[in-house]
Image: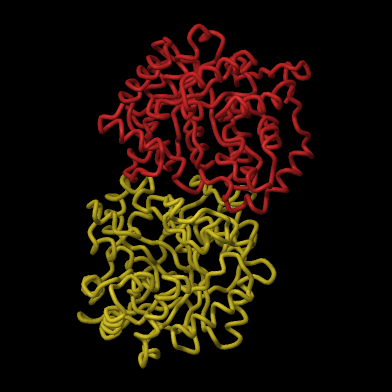
Chain colours: A yellow, B red
Amino acid sequence: MNESHENLIVHNLGRRGFLQRAGLLGAGAALSESLLQPQEGAPQLELSNTGPDKIPHKPFGRTKEKVSIIGLGGYTLGSAPSLKEAIMIVHEAIDAGVNFFDNAREYHEGKSEEWMGEALKGRRDKVFLMTKVCTHGRDKKVALRQLEESLKRLQTDHLDLWQIHECVYDNDPERHFAKGGVIEALDEAKKAGKVRYVGFTGHKHPAIHLKMLSYDYPFDSVQMPLNPFDASYRSFQKHVLSEVNERGMAALGMKSLGGNGQPIIKGVATVEEALRYSMSLAVATTISGVDSLAVLRQNLAIARGFKPMTADEMEALQNRCASAAGDGHLELYKSTMKYDGEVGRVQHGLPSPKELPL
Amino acid sequence: MVDQNHGTGAIPQRPLGRTGVKVSALGLGGHHLGDLKTVDEAIWLVHEAVDAGITFFDNCWEYWNGRAEDWLGLALKGRRDTVFLMTKVCTHGRGADLAMTMLDESLRRLQTDHLDLWQIHGVCFDNEPELAYAKGGVIDALDKAKKQGKVRFVGFTGHKDPSIHLDMIRRGYPFDTVQMPLNCLDATFRSFETQVLPELNQRRIAALGMKPMGGMATAVKCGLVKAEEMLRYAMSLPVATTIAGMDSVDVLRQNLRVARGFTPMTTAEMQALRDRCAETAGDGRHEVYKLSLRFDNPQARWSHCIPLDATQKEVQEMLFKEAGGP
């Protein structure tokens, strides 16, 4: 069956058929590789703002927006040694041509948003600003209250993008789409002009992302881990990426170095290989964690004058990483609870990271 | 499932798949046995279980760095022939030679010349089926051990994800048994009951249930379900046995009360229990072994390049031993 034929069937069957194809019905979110048909890689997205010293841009889904191929991660900004250094990181990134800025209401209990708000003073209009809402199953009132807090901390009257943070539990989609849930808050915030675009994020399992998409809500963006290791383990690249592109949504990549850089430290791939691979996929941007000027400069050097890897280069890198990546130890955000935040755990009745580190 | 001894007050004996052997519907877990305070308590517990009609005994090469096998070996002296003895091999992706070394250690500790059942322990990582079936993988050791007469039957275990179990089964090796978590919480979260159990029964492979309380019994502790309900649910499924961890004679006796003259739950009772658990069970909070690495043993972590958990008692004992402790 060719791909367009399969998609036609999927659309005609609607949600039920879509979930059946994904092997999700009546079976929790366990993903059977044999039930899931790997999707073909979508074509490269068009680069603009190119040139040897420039950070190229790519289209943000079906919108007219263009975003820089590398985005600045909000969590690690809050890990910078001081507010002063955080401000220097943000300013240098903007001056270099980075315009995509990531954050979340729960990062460092608000510090990441506060520092970014300080750093963006007078520069707000130069960036595409995103933050995330952290209801983890709670209702829209909680969501809208969090939005006001985020706007205040970020010192702005609107967000360019507001995403549902960390869809990582099998029953998160049901909770988000329940009556009075966070999805209604997305609608209201858009209507009130407080957010322009909406999306969701998660690092756990392609099946959970597909379940979120199965509700056919018009998300503008979907964020997921994308890197050369993902390709061989519970793969978002193989199972989610082209679905997102076919729906005209912007795919946002994260964890290009495997979350904590372990694959780099272990010598499985270099920073340049992993980051170039991630930026070569059909994503609008790759959100990169930067906690110092040194790391920022290293990443900017890779993004400047970026030329995508060829399909052969990408395949060769995937293959080289495959045997090490196959058990998930290079992607602990999928294989363990290490990256599941405290706030989400509380909402799901699970022990704290201290009690249950992995 | 109709039990032979139903209503007679004895623990029912059930067929073990297509092997022609029968085992007790309640089995004694080896991990908790090694966690008792003294060897005398362990021996006492085993003797009382044998006398009560439990024949299925679980163990594993890596439990408590060998102590669980040592203690069971001592307790079964003179009783070896009255039980169906299982232990597990802990290659976790490594090869057949290591497996054979582990087998000889297990036999020595258990003071026997053969096992009734030898299972591949903790198949919990996505690539382990591929590694097990590779040339020189642990599957080769299963064949070799059977040929040498050191083991009668073979199987595998795991607590992580039904898709990994299905991968192991569908690659086609003729396993005699497959062990997995089965309880009223599993029914609504990455469910072995709905995804794996029917496949096993269809292939006439004996299903062995474990974690009838969901591992840490958090659903019992928070008042959602009673321990007795959970055990009855697990034993009412189409399984050969339900392996339960028993860390005291009191717990053994409590379980024996359920197992003696066991009456299975009705379909309606089982559905009602699943429904009661569904909402909170749906995110996995009561089955942390599916979400976290907490229940993955040091050997598993080691062979998959994942740091050991220094807060685990087993790891602390291991490090102490390595450092020259008793």
Rendering quarter of residue A53: bottom left
- Name the quarter where the N terminus of chain B is drawn: top right
Q: Residue at x 35, y 29 (%)?
A: B137
Foreground: A182 or B67? B67
| Furthest residue in direction top, as rendered | B78
* One can see residue A50 in this view: no
Q: Percent x, y for residue A348?
A: 57, 57
Q: Is residue A30 above or below residue B179?
A: below
- Name the quarter where the C terminus of chain B is drawn: top left
Q: Is residue B53 above or below residue B315?
A: above
Q: Percent x, y for residue A240?
A: 48, 60
Q: Percent x, y for residue B179?
A: 54, 30
Q: How many marks?
A: 0
Q: Is residue B273 above or below residue B175?
A: below
Foreground: A238 or A226? A226
Q: Residue at x 36, y 70 (%)?
A: A287
Q: Percent x, y for residue A8?
A: 58, 62
